[in-house]
Image (cartoon, rainbow, N blue to C red):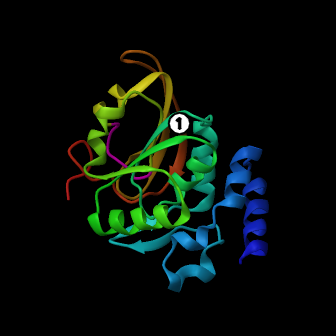
Amino acid sequence: MFENEREELIQILKGRGIKSESVLGAFRKVERHLFVPEIMRFNAYKDVALPIGQGQTISQPYTVAYMTEVLNPKPGQKILEIGTGSGFQAAVLCELGARVFTIERQFDLYNQTLKLFDKLGYKIAARCSDGTIGWSEFAPYDGIIVTAGGPTIPENLKKQLAIGGKMIIPVGDKATQTMKILTKYREDEFEMKESPYFAFVPLIGKEGWKE
């Protein structure tokens, strides 16, 4: 189902500069229409963000592909995702062989996505809590990917990143953000690159926006 639409999306992603064959391969395997509400399925392979309930969205495919390509996870690496949503990004990371740990703050969404992971056979560790605090029990992580826009980069997440690890997080105001790409060289020492003009739902929590 939707094979032609999925292939058309792959061509759009290539046209927008996504070069990683492994990322494009993961997009071929993960059926995005299963991660959106049934009423939205006819739009599942358009390069747009879609509402998934609870005021949340499934990110635009290009954004997911871009963040994943920048993170460049290798098989067996531990990746922490902040903002599970409907689970599409986590599934893509899983297809790339990463050990995925994901946090969602909305309980109903968390519950629904947990059932979907189980149904699709994805072995993903998930919890329902404040993502800005991270998940210290399994730290350090080789990569951290944040799928909501915050006012600053949470200090807890910086601490939980492994030396040599990379974090990608949108930072800005509630309307638009700049993608910050951090590489940790030593404890409290980071190299930072930026890529502008992204739009995410707000990162809410102790080290994010207040509700």
Nearest the viewer among 150 and 111 is 111
Identified at 33% across, 66% down, the residue is 111
- Horizontal arrangement in the rendering, residue 69 relative to residue 130 (left or right): right
Residue 155 x, y percent position in the rendering: 29, 31
Counting the numbered discs, the total is 1
Let me know if residue 104 is in the magenta part. Answer: no
- Residue 151 falls inside the magenta stretch: yes
The picture places residue 159, in percent across and down from the top left corner, at 33, 26
Q: In the rendered image, which quarter contains the C terminus?
A: bottom left
In the rendered image, the quadrant that contains the N terminus is bottom right
Tell me the kind of residue under disc 1. Answer: Glu
Query: Along the horizontal axis of the image, is 201 left or right of 74?
Result: left
Residue in the image at 63% along x and 61% along y:
30
In the image, the segment drawn in magenta is 147-153
Determine the main secondary structure of the stretch shown in magenta.
loop
- For the view shown, which residue lies furthest in the top direction? 186
Location of residue 161 with respect to 124 vertically, above or below: above
Q: Which residue is mark 1?
A: 194
Q: Position of residue 130 (x, y in %)?
A: 25, 49
> Which residue is drawn at the image coordinates 64% and 42% (left, top)?
69
Q: Looking at the image, is 197 positioned above or below residue 4?
A: above
Q: Quadrant of residue 161?
A: top left
Q: Is residue 6 left or right of residue 161?
A: right
- Within-10-Å neighbours for mark 1: few <14, some 14–19, many 20+: few
Q: Position of residue 68 (x, y in %)?
A: 59, 45
